[in-house]
Image (cartoon, rainbow, N blue to C red):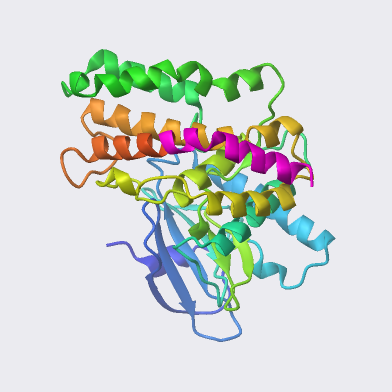
Amino acid sequence: MTDLRAITANFAISGEVAEIVPLGAGLINDTFLVKTQADATPDYVLQRINHAIFQDVALLQENIRYITSRIRYHLQQRHENDIDRKTLTLVPTKDQQLFFHDGENYWRLTIYIQGSKTFEQVTPDLAYQTGRAFGEFQYFLSDVPNPPIGETIPKFHNMEFRLQQLQEAISANRAGRLSKVQTIVDELLQRSEEMCKAERLHKEGKLPKRITHCDTKVNNMLFDQNNDFLCVIDLDTTMPGFVLSDFGDFIRTAANTGAEDDKDLSRIGLNMEIFREFSRGYLQTASAFLTPLEKELLPYGAQLLTYMQTVRFLTDYINGDTYYKIQYPEHNLQRTMAQLTLLHSIDKHMDEMNTWINHLSNN
């Protein structure tokens, strides 16, 4: 069993450790709260980085150092109060490294933001606040040309790459399931050219890549006890990408009236109130740097990310469930059907979404 006190001792902390306890229920990294003995010294968050997913830990940590330093700079420029609660603070090791390697695992430490909390359920008000928060997050990181950060998960939101994976799964048909899902495969492949539009526009120099969070969920934000927003967290997937990916992934997850793997497809659809409120908050803070084309493509982002996730679930199903954890044999097929149902609902609302974005952009 890992000696967490011994791991923590490698970092430049203040005070003496009182206890170390598990924190949160994250699916990727193992997270612990390091409580110190004196009230005057901060508590800390210790994480074991999942280096099977984040294979270049040095790149990962340098990304986070850069991102948090830029956010801190902008908060200082605005003369914000309580800046240490409005961005994550990395704690270096005693030899000034951004992580500690114990020979097997990689570890990092941040200062725990006291009195903070997260929300799991999205309301229209939280959708609005989330939109403002992620728009501001992108804005803070949009002002440096060619920022020195890299992809922590290569090709993570690259639609061409995800379709290549699907084609390879179809060709191999390792689990013998292709005939069962051929109609779904046909529908998705018929849409493939349209769904690769963002990558084509980028190659043509029309759609920029910016620093994007790539996991825009309400539970990746901290709030204080008065329910006021503090900061965006879970920065591991923050890397170069399209703003419409961040926009679209929130709509895919938060504006779905059903569950991601809902067995009752009749419950699934697009919640337009959540869409409108998130859009309203997002454009209030992001309009300052977005191009007209980026604004225009935001509803397409909802289509794209839902289509992408449908492709990923279907690919895993055809491959025999090798990537996503499943709870029953046809789980990935149910996920595929649920995402495809949401995609169809988004398709039906595209005119309404485009009209709303155009209204916000011109007011």
Asked where in the image residue 213 lies, by quadrant, the reply is: top right
Residue 56 in the figure: left or right of residue 3: right
- Farthest top residue in view: 171
Question: Does residue 150 appear anywhere in the picture?
Answer: no
Q: Nearer the viewer, residue 233 or 52?
A: 233
Based on the picture, tell me whether residue 347 belongs to the magenta stretch.
yes
Q: Nearer the viewer, residue 187 or 228?
A: 187
Q: Is residue 213 above or below residue 203?
A: below
Q: Is residue 290 above or below residue 203?
A: below
Q: Nearer the viewer, residue 92 or 160?
A: 160
Asked where in the image residue 344 lies, by quadrant, the reply is: top left
Question: Does residue 57 appear anywhere in the picture?
Answer: yes
Residue 153 in the figure: left or right of residue 138: left
Residue in the picture at 66% in, 31% down: 209
Numbered disc total: 0
User: Magenta stretch mostly in which secondary structure?
Assistant: helix
| Quadrant of the image containing the N terminus | bottom left
Q: Position of residue 321 (x, y in %)?
A: 23, 34
Residue in the picture at 36% in, 37% down: 341
Q: Position of residue 22 (x, y in %)?
A: 37, 68
Q: Is residue 227 above or below residue 169?
A: below
Based on the picture, tell me whether residue 53 belongs to the magenta stretch.
no
Q: Position of residue 250 (x, y in %)?
A: 52, 47
Residue in the picture at 48% in, 50% down: 271
Residue in the picture at 75% in, 33% down: 292
Q: Position of residue 331 (x, y in %)?
A: 22, 41
Magenta residue span: 344-363
Q: Is residue 128 above or below residue 229?
A: above
